[in-house]
Image (cartoon, rainbow, N blue to C red):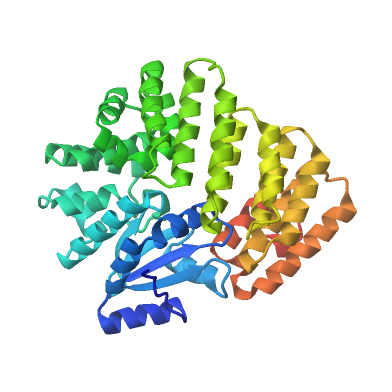
Amino acid sequence: MAAIEWLGGTLAQAQALAREQRRPLFLYWGAVWCPPCNRVKSDIFARDEFAARTASVLCYQLDGDGAGAQAQAARHGLRSYPTLVLFAPDGGEITRLPCELDGELFVSAFDTALAVHRAGSSAAAALEAALAGARALSADEWSLLSHYSWDTDEARLLGTRALAPTLSALAGTASAGGHADAAARLGLHAQLASGVGDAAALLAILADARMARANLDIFNDHGLQLVKIAGRREELAAALGGVAAQWADDLWFSLPDRLMAARLQLRMARLLAPSQGLQERVRARVEQALAESTDPYQRHTLVNTAVSALNDAGLTAQAEQVLLAELPRSHSPYYFMLSLAAGAKRRNDVAGVLDWYGKAWQASVGAATRIQWGVTYLNSLLELAPQDSARVARAVEGVLADLQAAGDDARQQRNLSQLQKLASKHASLPAALRA
């Protein structure tokens, strides 16, 4: 079995080695507890096909909790977990790849990115040429742009351009040039960015099994939103629900992706009419998926999806049971404690909310993670129990200790964002807790 060889040392050292060896550098930015990161590990990184592709590049993993990681992330525009960047040997970005793609499509997108680089182009060069009308883009360049990770761009590719009109312009140009697949995918992104749907375009994609499958990630993640903004709701819900039902039973897809499709099917059914036995079908899907899953990375993201599906079906007690049962076996139980706190909040159980947020913070591991979880707990205390001054004081003291332990990273990137949110809500906090 092939395995990815991750470089040691710092990101700067990895980039220096890439320049020296004239090889592209693949960067993975993530965290142990992050469900999409765990999905990437189980469905993409564990694939022999992907590991084989990485033999032609250098690979570097930047853990968000590593020493100095948040400062490095700030320099390179990394924020959302996970962010996947393919750098040219000179340090320029070839592209950012979407983590939501299934393993097969991710390998294809990775191949395309390398092919575009070998041809002397990049996502930035392709975007400039497309918007300026300077030249006709190749099919690979259009595929690269349509599979760009717009969600994790951080203005690296867009710069000062607005997302929605940029995507709409690209979709129109791709369509005019005969690049139907790229036009369809860019069009879906444009609808989501603008909040303006196109029912006819959605129905055309869903009627084409190959094209619908090529955009499974977008539909699984945003299908409900697309249907709500497009009009013709019943027609769209029926079409998307039928496609989702096929995906949910397709053994070619991973367990998490199949369960996400089953959740999408449930959401479409709820838009149409109450369905007899719907709750029982969801419960059975979840039980079967969890019984089949043994890989810890896959299971982490699977449990996250299972809990969402159960909550969508109104099975909140069963969702809580899944979470409680998972705590002893999870590699990041503190992540699921946040979901238990959310469940308590839905029940208006203030004591339960604060108890689970407190437990999550105490169990959390990693400098940046502890700051994020500690700020979450402190913010909940200030909102739900501001009169408990002793408890608030202990939380403030604990978060300050976590900030001190984080060193120079304490007020960088994701850590800085957490502190800014806290300060914007609670002006009376000590100055040391302000960004």
Residue drawn at 38 percent across, 38 percent down: 250
- Image: 223 above or below 400: above
- Image: 243 above or below 294: above
- Image: 214 above or below 92: above
> Where is residue 409, by image quadrant?
bottom right
In this orientation, which residue lies closer to the viewer: 326 or 151?
326
Is residue 174 visible in this depiction of the protein? yes
Q: Is residue 289 left or right of residue 337?
A: left
Q: What percent of the width, then of the height, locates residue 72?
A: 48, 71
> Where is residue 141, by image quadrant?
bottom left
Q: Is residue 177 left or right of residue 200?
A: left
Residue drawn at 67 percent across, 62 percent down: 371
Q: What percent of the width, then of the height, locates residue 227?
A: 40, 26
Q: What percent of the width, then of the height, locates residue 102?
A: 37, 49
> Where is residue 296, by image quadrant?
bottom right
In this orientation, which residue lies closer to the viewer: 283 or 33?
283
- Image: 45 above or below 14: above
Image quarter hosting the N terminus: bottom left
Residue drawn at 40 percent across, 67 percent down: 27
Q: What percent of the width, then of the height, locates residue 156?
A: 36, 59
Residue drawn at 41 percent across, 26 percent down: 241
Is residue 148 visible in this depiction of the protein? no
Image quarter hosting the C terminus: bottom right
In this orientation, which residue lies closer to the viewer: 18 or 262?
262
